[in-house]
Amino acid sequence: MAVLLSEAPALDTLCSETVADLLPPTAETVAALLGRVVKANRSALPMMITLLLDRLPEVAGLLPTVREGQQAAAIQAATDEAAGLLLRQLDQPVGGVQTRIAAGTLVDAGAAAGRIATLLTHLDTPDAKPGRREHLRAVRQRLNAGCKARFVSGLQDELLARLRPASDPVDIVALETAARGLRVLESEARAVGGGATYDLLLGKAAEAIGCDAMRDRLTRVEQVRLVEILSGSDAALAMADELG
């Protein structure tokens, strides 16, 4: 624990300086961090790699480069242990993938889905053992199910429910925020389970927002704007033409 706590500032800095594919972590930075852990207390290495993969799953793609020299065997063994630990955590019915996707905002859910999907992709290597591949398949299924469930609940509770006549006065900012969050989650979820379900749901939502019954809840500009966020500019232009 002392070793992990001493490296916490370096890990936080690494995470704050990383912006997805724009500013990915470097192999040199990761190697330096792991090298310090090995020298301080090798038994802390699996947990440090677990923390790295959980917060920055793209690091998994750098670990083969880091596994060189005298520390190679230790890092290889620690990486396997960390990967197994993370997959067991993600595969839990409580506290696993579905809990992570359900927690927070729709944008948070999309970010969580993206991190998990990236981790699974990096762990699915050609030399992965059958047991690891089966575990990856199970976690992907949970991720797919969790994304769909969060998307449906967000669509119903955070968007459509706010448009019902009996609901509170329309908060267009909250509606646009929900619509953007749905698109963030949908874009990440497509990589896991395909897009047919999301296309159908987004299309139905756009139809509901654009119908004449919404005229008492939304202005025409608001209708077009929400449809643009949910289904794109072409759908918004088509709706604008229909509304005249």
Image: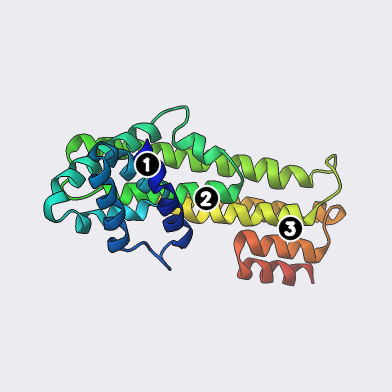
- Image quarter hosting the N terminus: top left
What type is the residue that disc 2 sits on? Gly
Q: Is residue 31 above or below residue 243?
A: above
Residue at 69% x, 40% y is: 157
Q: Secondary structure at mark 2?
A: helix
| Quarter that holds the C terminus | bottom right
Badge 2 crowding class, 10 Å Cα cut-off, few under 14, some 14 to 19, many 20 or more, is many
At horizontal 87% and vertical 53% (from top left) the residue drawn is 216
Residue at the spot of label 2: 110
Instruction: Name the residue that disc number 1 marks.
Output: 4
* Mark nearer the N terminus (3 vs 1): 1
Instruction: Give the colouring mode of the picture.
Output: rainbow
Q: Is residue 56 left or right of residue 198?
A: left
Disc sitting over residue 210 in the figure: 3
Figure check: 22 above or below 57: below
* Residue 72, horizontal then vertical, whole percent: 15, 50
Q: Earlier in the sequence, mark 2 or mark 1?
A: 1
Quick one: 106 or 45, which is closer to the camera?
45
Up the image or down, 149 lies above or below 26; here it is above
Q: Residue at (71%, 51%) from the top-left corner?
A: 208
Whether residue 219 is visible to the viewer of this picture, yes or no, is: yes
Amino acid carrying label 1: it is Leu
Label tally:
3
The earlier-in-sequence mark between 2 and 3 is 2
